[in-house]
Amino acid sequence: MNKFLLVLGFFIQFQNITFAQDLPSIQTDRPDQTECPFITPRHFFQLENGFSYEKNNQNSELIVAPTILTRFGINKYFELRLITEYVISKENENTYAGINPVLIGFKTRLLEEKGIIPFTSLIAHIGFPEVASSQYRANYYYPEFRFTMQHTISDKQSLSYNLGAEWNGVDKKPTFIYTLTSGYSLTETIGAYIEFYGFVPQIGKADHRFDLGLTYLFNDNHQLDVSGGFGLSAISPEYYFALGYSFRFKV
C-alpha cells in the first residue's frame, strides 16, 4: 500500500510539473448537477469518476459505483464525451445490478461572457439502448441536451445554470431539466457550492431537489469532491450523497 501511495503521489506531481504551463486548473462537470461551460483542453483526456448512494424511500435505493464521464478536447470550442455507469438498484426484496445504456456526445462552446451575456455552451448526448446490461436496456435510442451558462460574480464567486431536456428511452415523452448553482472559492484549493435543480416531465409531477458540496484541488490536474442533497417534492428521493475523483492528462 505504501508503494502504491508513493507511485500515485509521484504521478500526480509529475503531471503537475509537465502539463500545468499556460493551462487553467481542471474544470469538471461534477459534483453538482449543473454542467460547466468549459471545454477540456486540446488533446487532453479528462476522467470524472464518482460513487453515489440515493435513498428513494424505505423500500428503494440506488447505488452508482462507478459513474465515469470521459472527456476529450478536440480544440478550444469542442470536446467529445462518453458516459458509463454501473448501477445497483434495490426495490423491496429484489436487487438488480448492471451497466446503464452508454451515452456518447459532445460539448461545444457557443458564447463568451460579455456583460449580461453568460459564458454559454451546448452539451448533447445520445443513449444506445442495446449497449447495456439486459435488465437496463431501453426501448429506443434516446437524446439529452442542455445549455450550460455561467456568470462571473467576482474573483471568488460564480453563478451558473442549465436548461435542457432528456428522454428515458422507455417512452417518447421528454423531461425538462433546470439547475441553478452558486459556486464560491473558499481558498485557492477548496471550493464550495449550493444548488437547486429539478426535473419537470411532460406528463406527471415535477421533481425538485437541493444539494451542496465541496471540492479539493490537489493541483491543476487532480480534484476530489464530496456532495449530498435531499428532495423537495413528494416524489423526490429522500437524500443522496456522492464522492468523486477527477483528473486529466495529455496524449
Image (cartoon, rainbow, N blue to C red):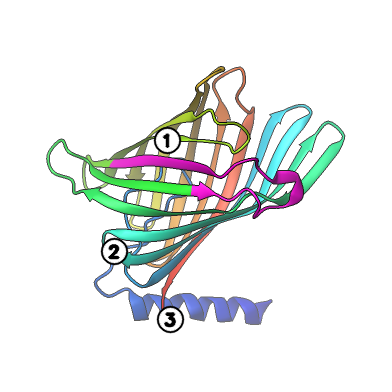
Nearest-to-viewer mark from 2 and 3 = 2
Q: Residue at x 28, y 42 (%)?
A: 150
- The residue carrying mark 2 is 24
- Residue 44, placed above or below residue 99: below
Q: Which mark is residue 159?
A: none
Q: Please identify the quadrant where the C terminus is shown.
A: bottom left
Q: Secondary structure at mark 1?
A: strand
Q: Which mark is residue 194?
A: 1
Q: Nearer the viewer, residue 176 or 38?
A: 176
Q: From this viewpoint, is residue 185 visible?
A: no
Q: Report the Cα–Cα distance between label 2 and label 3.
A: 17 Å
**In this picture, which residue range is highlighted in magenta?**
126-149
Q: Secondary structure at mark 2?
A: loop
Res 26 quadrant in image: bottom left
Q: Are marks 2 and 3 in contact (CB under 8 Å)?
A: no
- Residue 7, placed above or below residue 156: below
Res 229 quadrant in image: top right
Q: Nearer the viewer, residue 62 or 121?
A: 121
Q: Residue at x 44, y 77 (%)?
A: 13
Determine whether, in the image, residue 217 is placed left or right of residue 171: left
Between discs 2 and 1, the one toward the N terminus = 2
Q: Residue at x 33, y 42 (%)?
A: 148
Q: Report the Cα–Cα distance between label 2 and label 1.
A: 23 Å
Residue 143 on the magenta segment: yes
Q: Report the Cα–Cα distance between label 3 and label 1.
A: 33 Å
Q: Position of residue 206 (x, y in %)?
A: 52, 20
Q: Position of residue 226 (x, y in %)?
A: 53, 48
Question: In the rendered structure, which amino acid carries the disc numbered 2?
Answer: Pro
Q: Which mark is residue 14?
A: 3
Q: Position of residue 54 (x, y in %)?
A: 65, 37
Task: Decide: few, some or many residues near mark 2? Use Cα within 10 Å; few <14, some 14-19, many ≥20.
Answer: few
